[in-house]
Image: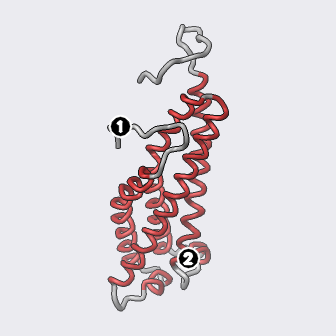
Amino acid sequence: MANRGTCYGAADTAGNTLNIAGMVFGIVEFAVSIALAATTVRLGMWALDRATHDLDEPAELARGNVAVAILHGALLLAIAVIVRRAIEPAVFAAKALVAQFGGLEGGLLALAWVGGYAVVAAFLALVGLLVAVRVAQRALGDVDTMAALRGGNVAIAIMLAAVVAVIAIFLADGVAALIDALPPPGGLVRIQTAGP
């Protein structure tokens, strides 16, 4: 197991020290991850609805339209990949905040910082992916992609999903670089680390 710093807590029966602060931070990080995932899904569904004005996604999904489900799924996965990559350094720094400030103050500051970065990353991801879908639609020329999706054209859906995946792969690093350029919260200085 990697050394995660000084451990304070009670010893278990095997003589191992329990890291209470680490456990609490882990539980909070788990809860924040669930909230970020739910928010990402909700934002992704909202964005797809805005990008596809001519398509009633809930109705299409309810009738079993696989083409719409493929595109929807690709956009949701792409947003998650981008947001996760962008906030990864912020999560690492949030742990430093908790260590530096300790207690509730450090935890709340870390939570606000990671949450703010996640919102910015999600917005940038949505904008980038919506532009990508529009570019893909235009690249197809005379093909009415919304009519094709409404008609259950899986080939069009797979092509659009592939465009979304390719854009997400490249966009993730760009969004992460933009997020990394944002200033850290007060009291912290930026430290260059070797990482993802």
Look at the picture and state if 61 lies above or below 144.
above
Q: Earlier in the sequence, mark 2 or mark 1?
A: 2
Look at the picture and state if 67 lies above or below 12.
below
Nearer the viewer's eye, disc 2 or disc 1?
1
**Residue at (37%, 61%) from the top-left corner?**
171
Q: Is the residue under label 1 in contact with that under label 2 (CB below 8 Å)?
A: no
Q: Quadrant of residue 88?
A: top left
What amino acid is at disc 1? Thr
Whether residue 196 is visible: yes
In-front residue for pair 147/123 = 123
Distance, label 2 to label 1, CA atoms, is 39 Å
Location of mark 2 (residue) = 50
**Residue at (49%, 66%) from the top-left corner?**
126
What amino acid is at disc 2? Arg
In-front residue for pair 154/42 = 42
Q: Which mark is residue 193?
A: 1
List the single residue furthest toward the bottom.
142
**Residue at (35%, 37%) from the top-left corner?**
193
